[in-house]
Amino acid sequence: MSSNTLKVGDVDLANPEIFEKAVPHEYFALLRKEAPITWQPQPDEENGGFWNITRYADIEEIEKNVEVFTSRCDISPMPVPQSTLENTIDHSIIMSDPPRHTFLRQAIMKAFTPKAIKKLEETIQTCAVDAMNAIIDKGECDLHDMAAYTPIEVVAEILGVPAHDRQKLFDWANAMFGSSDPELSDPQRNMMGAFQMFSYARRLGMARRANPSDDVFSMLSAAEEDGEQLSDIDLGATFIVLATAGNETTRTQFLQGALLLIEHPEVAAQLREDPSLMNNAVEEMLRLTTPAMCFARRATRDHVVNGQLIQAGEKVLMWYVSGNRDEAVFDDPNTFNIFRKNANKHLSFGATGAIHRCLGANLARTELRAMLQQLVTRLPDVQLGGKVDRLRSNFTNGIKRMPVKFSKAEPTADASHVTMYASGYEAALKQGANAAEPEVVLQASEGHGIELVHLAKVVLELGVPIIIPEGPRGTRLMVDVTKASWDGARIKAVGAPCPAGDWATVSADGTLMIDVRATIETHDGATIFISYEGRSDYSKGGTAPIIITPKFETADPRYMWLNKVQAVGRGHAEGMSKLIYDVYEVR
Ligand code: HEM
């Protein structure tokens, strides 16, 4: 659509598909000019939509007014299930308000000691050189994979994640960020990614508390603020923020910056000749491309912004990507100008002086300078080698694939130790599809053409149930599974900490209905989510068989075959404290 015919209301900014083609800059310019605050309907969403905030000054005002505009809400355009919100608000720094936010922010800042920062700067430099050495003799590559390396290594260093778990960390983060792009994820995988990362973080936090190391996460696990330590849940939520905030954004900015330099080889040449220009060039790249395109807040009471009444409870989406091209602040805003005097006034890390302004801004800048310096000096003739694929997202200005070609050169050092993180789920799925199914040991077969193939003997040890009497369907029991083991030829696993949140309802006639959500961890490190419903007849005192129909979900390529398995289990209770099942695959 040309800018002459474009009208306010023409572009659905809630639709990630629009952004997959390109950021609708012309439309944002129109909104800034004619309708700086417009209501964006989202008919399928609980709150019916959000306000688009497009001017720099309005974004700044909202971001700084933490009395009226709360961060205890869904902070991105993506719908977030209420249960996730309830579990995250006040634990995740980015979804908290003062004084809670002040407590979390100070605890995190304390963990970034000068020694830790120095070590991270060394890691950044080494990683940027290593990543370049890994591709430079190939003559072509997907720059996305190279871009992923340094940010994930830096985040892993901060969090103390061992090398063999880093691909998992990368996949979970991608599942969370790519949830509006069907190629990378979906809302279910987004939840699973968050869940898996959370349970991993809790275990890591516990391990670091027992055995501190010198990473930032160990420091955070031990940090005290007013005599108070971060809880397990706070630690898990902080882990997720650092792992996602510090990873996808920096990768995106490097790729967007590289694209600008490929489109403007004369600028790459200037940076090659005078490295001191790199600082401002990075600021200008951040301004022009805006990796995190927006963040949201909710009004806690009625309030007028720039003449527009925002009612209590309504969501406002601060479009940094639009504020960064606001003609009232930046002259000739669509031009890439590395000499721009006020380039660093951009909103890409949030508004200057706002309490949620990016904690990793300086770290991100150091990473970007190091990576871009490698690009301009060592790949002087880099150019696109194919189509650039953008992420389908109205939150992240992401790039999924960016094939490039260049003249081959000799690496400066051996780079065989460098793991190029495969492009998220794409590679994991490929690996999963090719993985051979593990050998089947047939243990049970019952007529009618149906085979029952033994999957595992399951033993669950139960804590004392919390009893909630007289619910609409009978007495409700909340049961804590204190220990879980799955033992079979194809799957051997134990329950992850807090393996299950079980509910059981015993109705007046003695029917026991159970509802289980559990996570188990296999002996070789995969995380599998299991959910099942079951029933039993408790009228005779709890000795009757219990029948269950488990479903499995995992993103681990080695166990993806489980996602397709139909299963039944038959078991019994041993007193009130143990349940034993045999689980079979139905074929
Ligand atoms: C180019 C890279 C990056 C960009 C564009 C970026 C962008 C942002 C933005 C816009 C916010 C503010 C959100 C708001 O106002 O609600 C933010 C917050 C945050 N960022 Fe970054 N970020 C980047 C890299 C990093 C890195 C490398 C880390 C750490 C390893 C990090 C950690 C955080 C944290 C912890 C917060 C929450 C701060 C708070 O709520 O007080 N970010 N980031």
Image (spheres, rainbow, N blue to C red):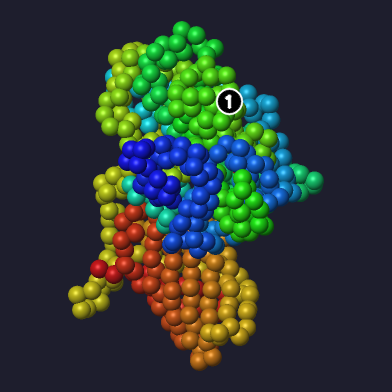
- Quadrant where the N terminus lies? top left
The image quadrant of residue 409 is top left
Which residue is drawn at the image coordinates 29% and 44% (left, top)?
Answer: 430
Outermost right residue: 226
Outermost top residue: 273
Q: In terms of depth relative to the viewer, which is nearer, 153 or 575?
A: 153
Q: In terms of depth relative to the viewer, which is nearer, 320 or 365?
A: 320
Task: Answer above or below: position of 457 versus 379.
Answer: below
Image coordinates of residue 117 in percent, x first then y, are 63, 27
Q: Label 1 amino acid? A: Asn
Q: In terms of depth relative to the viewer, which is nearer, 464 or 223?
A: 223
Which residue is drawn at the image coordinates 58% and 77% (left, top)?
Answer: 477
Task: Answer above or below: position of 423 versus 518.
Answer: above
Residue 444 seen anywhere in this rendered image of the structure? yes
Q: Which secondary structure lies at badge 1?
A: helix
Which residue is drawn at the image coordinates 53% and 65% (left, top)?
Answer: 500
Q: Is residue 335 left or right of residue 5?
A: right
The image quadrant of residue 318 is top right
Outermost left residue: 449
Q: Is residue 548 left or right of residue 512?
A: left
Image coordinates of residue 50 in percent, x first then y, are 52, 53
Image coordinates of residue 563 in percent, x first then y, are 34, 59
Q: Residues within 10 Å of mark 1 (few under 14, many from 20)?
A: some
Which residue in the structure is indicated by mark 1? 344
Residue 120 seen anywhere in this rendered image of the structure? no
- Quadrant where the C terminus lies? bottom left
Image coordinates of residue 254 in percent, x first then y, are 45, 28
